[in-house]
Image (cartoon, rainbow, N blue to C red):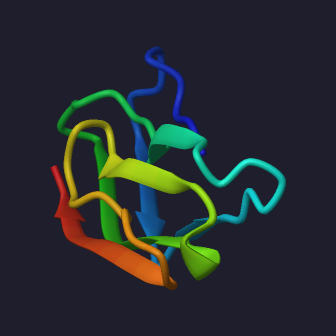
Amino acid sequence: YRVDDSVEQHEGWGMGSYCYYNVDPTIVQEHGFKAPVKPGVKFHNLLVVSLGGNGQYQHVINNVGSPTSGTSTIPSTVTNFP
């Protein structure tokens, strides 16, 4: 999910993204969400999850949040951004 850099107002609540790369579980995505850091752009209760450890996210949003590395279903959350 990406919010364009030109956006001045955006607010997301309870959003999630998952990955499941069973054909190539070594795939690593940088993040599930990307957004400009601006006063009017806010997120609450974000979740990314790697299903069955098939692939992983490095971060939840931009460079914030823990990776979902492992061999089982691994979630990572960010309560508020920024």
**Residue 80 figure quarter:** bottom left
Write the residue at 40% across / 34% down.
35
Q: Is residue 24 left or right of residue 31?
A: right
Residue furthest out toward the right:
23
Q: Nearer the viewer, residue 17 or 7?
A: 17
**Residue 34 figure quarter:** top left
Residue furthest out toward the top:
6
Write the residue at 58% across / 46% down.
26
Decide: is 79 above or below 4: below
Write the residue at 41% across / 39% down.
9
Q: Position of residue 28 (x, y in %)?
A: 51, 41
Q: How many marks?
A: 0
Decide: is 45 above or below 40: below
Q: Nearer the viewer, residue 69 or 57?
A: 69
Q: Position of residue 81 (x, y in %)?
A: 21, 55
Quadrant where the N terminus lies?
top right
Q: Nearer the viewer, residue 8 or 28?
A: 28
Q: Position of residue 41 (x, y in %)?
A: 32, 43
Write the residue at 47% across / 46% down.
33
**Residue 47 figure quarter:** bottom left
